[in-house]
Amino acid sequence: MKIAAIVGARPNFVKIAPIVAKLRTRPEAITTLIHTGQRYDAPMSDAFFANLELPDPDVNLHVKASSATAQIAEIMLRLEPVAESRPDLVVVVGDVNSTLAGALTASKLGLRLAHVEAGLRSFDRTMPEEINRVLTDSISDPLYHGAGRQREPRAGGHSGRPRSLCRQRDDRHAVPVPRACPRILDP
């Protein structure tokens, strides 16, 4: 199974690190880590990748833009040729512009899309992150939530219920995403 994992900002790195680490131990998972460059500062990015033991990105889109709209559009334009390799699953995390751009690109190309940290809601549509969350959840399947903070999407949102990314042995109490053992490869 070919998996494209898209990151672009500090919160994404923290969330994707345990997922990529686990996926890279599974021989059936060929994982490509794509860095959009949304908030790229070489020393900071390098420090996060080193401290989280994230491998260097397989692809860096090096996107620089002056506005959120331009950034999302540029990420989509640069991501499309990469995504034409037709991964079996695109994984996006969180609620940053890279998340929305990756989700929209996957959806437009007819690729299966998983959203990690789905179902979180502030219900404040003046927040750009809330718009990113709502739109990403609405076009993603499967949806995975982190432990303890998830909320069900309201009417008019995605009809699927967010699944736990990982659970403890008794399968009742979710483990936080940073210590997750992902079920992304499970049906």
Image (spheres, grey):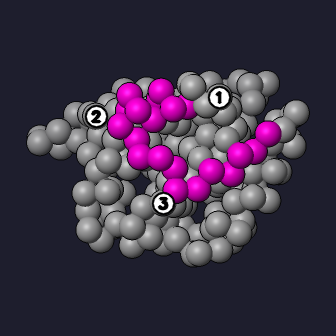
Other-residue count near label 1 (Cα within 10 Å), few / some / many at <14 / 14–19 / ≥20: few
Q: Three-letter amino acid code at disc 3?
A: Thr
Q: Which residues are magenta?
A: 45-64
Q: Is residue 5 left or right of residue 21?
A: right
Q: Quadrant of residue 153?
A: top right
Q: Three-letter amino acid code at disc 1?
A: Asp
Question: For the residue labelled by badge 3, is the local secondary structure a helix, a strand or a loop?
Answer: strand
Q: CA distance from mark 3 to mark 1?
A: 21 Å
Other-residue count near label 2 (Cα within 10 Å), few / some / many at <14 / 14–19 / ≥20: few
Q: Earlier in the sequence, mark 1 or mark 2?
A: 1
What residue is drawn where x is 36% and y is 47%? 19
Q: Is residue 57 left or right of residue 105?
A: left
Expressed as whole percent of the image width and height from the top left, the position of residue 157 reads 63, 47
Q: CA distance from mark 3 to mark 2?
A: 21 Å
Expressed as whole percent of the image width and height from the top left, the position of residue 124 reads 71, 24
Q: Earlier in the sequence, mark 3 or mark 1?
A: 3
Q: Which mark is residue 179?
A: 2
Expressed as whole percent of the image width and height from the top left, the position of residue 131 reads 72, 37
What residue is drawn where x is 74% and y is 25%? 127
What residue is drawn where x is 69% and y is 60%? 79
Could you tell me if the residues under marks 3 and 1 are in contact, i.e. CB atoms within 8 Å? no
Q: Which residue is mark 1?
A: 41
Residue lying farthest to the front in this orientation: 43
Q: CA distance from mark 1 to mark 2?
A: 26 Å
What residue is drawn where x is 66% and y is 33%? 40
